[in-house]
Image: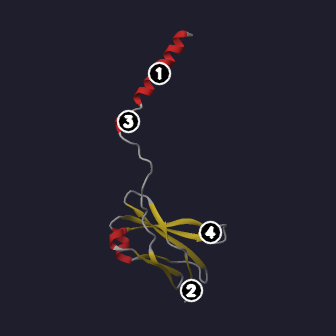
Amino acid sequence: MLKRISLYAVIVLFLLSGCSDEHGTSPTSFEYEALPAPENFEITSANYSLTLSWDYSPEKIALTKEFFVYVVDPNQYGGVIYPVDTLTVADYNTSKGCTFDKLAANMEFCFVVSAVDLSGIEGWRAEAECGTTTAP
């Protein structure tokens, strides 16, 4: 029993001696600025398709890996979102958005888009926008 108490005392002293201020201070918070939501997000409708477009500044594009596109189900509590597409920066620079085609006519679809930074962290999402498909 005395050996067990001595062992515990040695372990506690060892742990306490390792906790010193010689290693500097510990960080008290984590500071990270998420990428802002894309601006001027809009949906244009055409025959059986919807085209999503948005603006993103060149300064922010330099920090962006890709964009996430979600469809919003407004019938679910709080508007549940489902991922439907990922758009690379190269594709965005070419098209400034994306198109969903072969959709049913006269149907409303709502979407949300966000930017993902170079480390893979998703930024703020744009406000949901909705569009209704048309028939020819």
Q: Where 25 falls versus 61 (above or below)? A: above
Question: Nearer the N terminus, badge 1 or badge 4?
Answer: 1
Reading the image, the residue beneath label 4 is 79
The quadrant where residue 31 appears: bottom left
Type of the residue with mark 4: Gly
- Where is mark 2, residue-wise? 134
Q: Quadrant of residue 39?
A: bottom left
Q: Secondary structure at mark 4?
A: loop
Q: Residue at x 49, y 16 (%)?
A: 7
User: Tag 3: Cα neighbours inside 10 Å, few (<14), some, or many (≥20)?
Assistant: few
29 lies above or below 50: above
Residue 105 on image: x %, y %: 59, 83
Label at residue 21: 3
**In front: mark 1 or mark 3?**
3
Front: mark 1 or 4: 1
Q: Residue at x 44, y 27 (%)?
A: 16
